[in-house]
Amino acid sequence: MTAYPAKPYPGQRWANCRPIGLPFLRQLGLLPTWQFGDVYGMDPELLSMVPRPVCAVLLLFPVTEKYESFRLEEEAKIKAQGQDVSPDVYFMKQTIGNACGTIGLIHAVANNQEHLEFETDSPLKMFLVQSTKLSPENKATFLEKDESIRVTHESSAQEGQTEAPSLDEKVDLHFIAFVNVGGHLYELDGRKPFPISHGKTSEVHFLEDATEVCKTFMARDPQELRFTVVALSKA
């Protein structure tokens, strides 16, 4: 039995948790100067096939009892010991059910605005500009009220599916983002109360450093096969 709380998201529920990638972002005004691509393995040979530079990594993983136990222990440890997090990290809480893919994409884009390009009337760029100084909780509330992103999320989520998932369907897969901000590797998960710092990184070694953290997720649940890693690379 998964240790998800009965009602983990106090806000709305959207139709689907799968990340919808570039089509979703293009509809919100992100220009296709960077692209998402699958990471097919964690060994050096397969990582060498990923186009560089990479500015963000998304991880899809199953929420299991082992992971939930680890998450709670990690949160308690950081609250007790503290951690250094750059004020430049854009981080938002997740209060909308089934929106983890969209929030993962927002985290990836928001923390790489110096690399990415937007159309002049981009709804996504407008959202980021207006929300950047808000608290993580208020960013979440702001997203709940953003009709452009909600409608684009729901229309994109239906593409390629033979049957639309129910809004009440339990989703036990979750997306998180890894980004490099100020030379430090951060894990951004809207279910957590704060970003998780994983130490120093660099543009050159970011993909390797991020996938090392992804390996720890896989090692925690060695019987699980439901892991997917996606990199946002220069087109």
Image (spheres, rainbow, N blue to C red):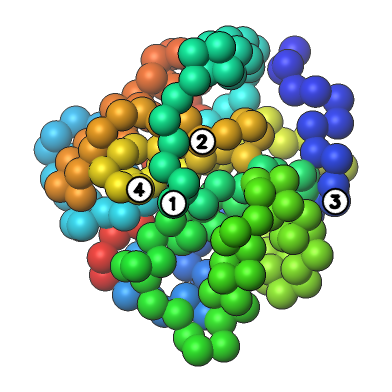
The residue carrying pointer 4 sits among few (fewer than 14), some (14 to 19) or many (20 or more) residues within 10 Å by Cα, namely many
The location of residue 33, given as percent across then percent down, is 32, 75
- Give the amino acid at mark 1: Asp
Any part of residue 18 in sight: no
Residue 185 figure quarter: top left
Mark with earlier residue (4, 2): 4
- Give the amino acid at mark 2: Pro
Q: Which mark is residue 125?
A: none
Q: According to the image, label 3 marks what residue?
A: 12
Mark with earlier residue (1, 3): 3
Q: CA distance from mark 4 to mark 1?
A: 7 Å
Q: According to the image, label 1 marks what residue?
A: 88
Q: Is residue 1 above or below residue 32?
A: above
Q: Are marks 3 and 2 in contact (CB under 8 Å)?
A: no
Q: According to the image, label 4 marks what residue?
A: 181
Mark with earlier residue (2, 1): 1
Q: Nearer the viewer, mark 2 or mark 1?
A: 1
* For residue 219, side relative to residue 156 (left or right): left
Mark with earlier residue (3, 4): 3
